[in-house]
Amino acid sequence: MEIFGYCRISSKDQCESRQIMAMNELKIPLQNIFVDKQSGKDFDRPAYKALVEKLQAGDLLWVKELSRLGRDYSEIQNQWRILTKKGIDIAIIDQPLLDTRLHKDLLGTFISELILSVLSFVSQSEFDNIRQRQKEGIAAAKARGVRFGRPIKPTPRNFDELVKRWNAKQLSKEKILKMCSISESTFYRRSVEHRRKQS
């Protein structure tokens, strides 16, 4: 029997150290700890796939909390069943009742399934609520005039005049790019805006 750990964070600017520390306390070998840095909306994750390839009957998989395994209600349950049917035990550190080693009889399986259903539903609900709050926050920010994406690079006041001179072949595009410190794509976009203003 081998012991494995699975950690997941939603984005690259988050830190997985809290989960790794929990795995270290369980004496899980470093090479058996798999970490994904992406959303839990599905199980199409490179580290998770590599983990599943290594897991064999009799192995034990530790996860810090159910939401680290995934965020989709039906997918969590589906993956749980796939692993347990292969004879792999799963234990959730923060939810001790979710430990397939505890009860191997019919009643124990029923209780585990029931707890799993409730907790995976809560996990997806939290995920849906986070997404809804993000949408509402973005909408409110846009209503206040907040712009998203890279800031717009200002062009000189005489940009329209420079475009006219470029159209008249009096000035090269390269010279304008250097004078304005802008990229070629920005130049073309702004020159189109200039033509619209003229029409």
Image (tube, rainbow, N blue to C red):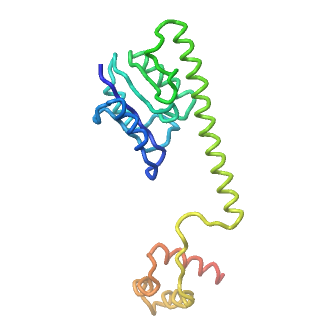
The residue at 61%/38% (across/down) is 126
Asked if residue 111 is positioned above or below residue 165 in the image, the reply reads above
Residue 183 lies, in percent from the top left, at 44, 75
Farthest-out residue, front: 25
The residue at 59%/81% (across/down) is 194
The residue at 55%/33% (across/down) is 72
Farthest-out residue, bottom: 170
Q: Nearer the viewer, residue 13 or 131?
A: 13
Residue 178 lies, in percent from the top left, at 41, 85
Asked if residue 160 is positioned above or below residue 14 in the image, the reply reads below
Q: Nearer the viewer, residue 158 or 127?
A: 127
Asked if residue 182 is positioned above or below residue 169 in the image, the reply reads above
The residue at 61%/29% (across/down) is 121
Asked if residue 152 is positioned above or below residue 103 in the image, the reply reads below
Quadrant of the rendered image containing residue 101: top left
Residue 82 lies, in percent from the top left, at 44, 20
103 vs 143, left or right, is: left
103 vs 119, left or right, is: left
Residue 93 lies, in percent from the top left, at 46, 29
Q: Quadrant of the N terminus?
A: top left
Q: Nearer the viewer, residue 171 or 32?
A: 32
- Number of labels in the image equals 0
Q: Quadrant of the C terminus?
A: bottom right
